[in-house]
Image (cartoon, grey):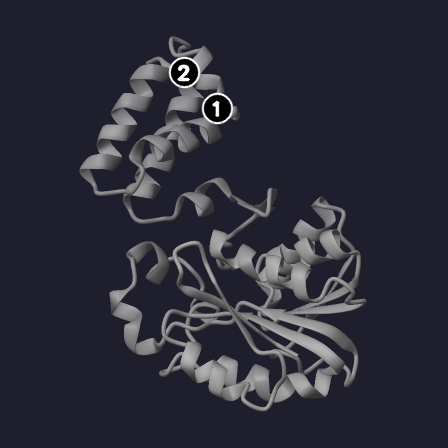
């Protein structure tokens, strides 16, 4: 079987199963099987697949048809123009979370000490370490997630300090100029309404913010004044229904700002 035929057949299988962007997914999975970039296929459509490549491609298609996210098959996801390794121990970084980075670069560029709460893959902590050059800490309650993040930091040559703890329990008082977080914010009551790729494969500890979806916001906002230095910023990603609740939590803070994404949806909240 050659590349062109493999892509046509894979695309048809994915399309019939209702998988989003089936052609792109087929290209990514075939590229992973052949260890080449997608662009390779446009110049070599007639190249014959080796048996091992065809076997791997078939296995990857089977996993994707079963609902496994493409990123957990390839173990790769781009964030802020850098490639991160992801495993089922960490949430897959979303493009929307890049708005947290942009807000931090705009509002807190002078920060010398930065903390990422609930780091997961390390995407926020590593990106801010490389963009700001600040001393950076990252926490996660999952030792497995922290190990993935540490591996990403080493691969990207970002000197981030990691701590396995519950939110900010291991962080000293008055020690940070900036706290960022993309906390779990999906209400447990919404579990059955999630896409199966999310519900059945991504780590629940990184998805669900209790029955209301607000429990982690409540705890982060309550403890942030202990950790932040005077004038420090707290910047968090917002869930779809969390704006009013989180804005009320920050009523006593200064410079509260709500930043929308490109679709106009409130995506980030920042306060000093």
* Residue that appears at 48% across and 40% down: 74
Instruction: Return the residue at label 1.
Output: 34
* Residue that appears at 43% across and 32% down: 28
Residue 188 in sight from this viewpoint = yes
Quarter residue 213 falls in: bottom left
Instruction: Return the residue at label 2.
Output: 49
Q: Is residue 160 left or right of residue 198?
A: right
* Residue that appears at 60% across and 42% down: 81
Where does residue 134 sit, x and y in percent of width and height?
79, 61
The residue nearer to you, when weighing 47 against 106, is 106
Q: Quadrant of the N terminus?
A: top left
Q: Do the residues labelled 2 and 1 touch (CB within 8 Å)?
A: yes
Where does residue 264 sit, x and y in percent of width and height?
40, 60
Badge 2 crowding class, 10 Å Cα cut-off, few under 14, some 14 to 19, many 20 or more, is some
Where does residue 64 sit, x and y in percent of width and height?
33, 42
Q: Is residue 133 left or right of residue 52?
A: right
Residue 92 in sight from this viewpoint = no
């Amino acid at each position: 079987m050659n590349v062109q035929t493999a892509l046509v057949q894979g695309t048809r299988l994915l399309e019939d199963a209702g998988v989003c962007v089936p052609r792109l997914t087929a290209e990514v999975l075939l590229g992973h099987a052949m260890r080449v970039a997608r662009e390779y296929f446009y110049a070599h459509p007639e190249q014959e697949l080796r048996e091992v490549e065809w076997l791997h491609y078939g296995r990857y298609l089977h996993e994707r048809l079963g609902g496994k996210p493409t990123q957990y098959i390839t173990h790769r996801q781009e964030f802020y123009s850098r490639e991160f390794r992801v495993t089922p121990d960490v949430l897959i970084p979303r493009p929307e979370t890049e708005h947290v980075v942009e807000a931090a670069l705009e509002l807190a560029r002078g920060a010398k000490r930065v903390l990422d709460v609930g780091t997961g893959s390390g995407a926020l902590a590593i990106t801010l370490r490389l963009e700001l050059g600040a001393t950076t800490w990252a926490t996660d309650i999952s030792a497995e997630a922290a190990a993935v993040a540490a591996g990403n930091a080493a691969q990207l040559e970002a000197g981030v300090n990691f701590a396995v703890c519950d939110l900010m329990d291991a962080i000293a008082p008055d020690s940070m100029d900036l706290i960022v977080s993309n906390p779990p914010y999906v209400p447990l009551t919404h579990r059955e309404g999630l896409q199966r790729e999310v519900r059945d494969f991504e780590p629940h500890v990184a998805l669900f913010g209790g029955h209301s979806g607000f429990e982690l916001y409540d705890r982060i906002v309550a403890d942030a004044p202990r950790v932040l230095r005077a004038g420090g910023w707290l910047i968090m990603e917002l869930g779809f229904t969390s704006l009013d609740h989180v804005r009320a939590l920050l009523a006593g803070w200064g410079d509260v700002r709500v930043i929308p994404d490109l679709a106009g949806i409130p995506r980030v909240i920042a306060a000093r």
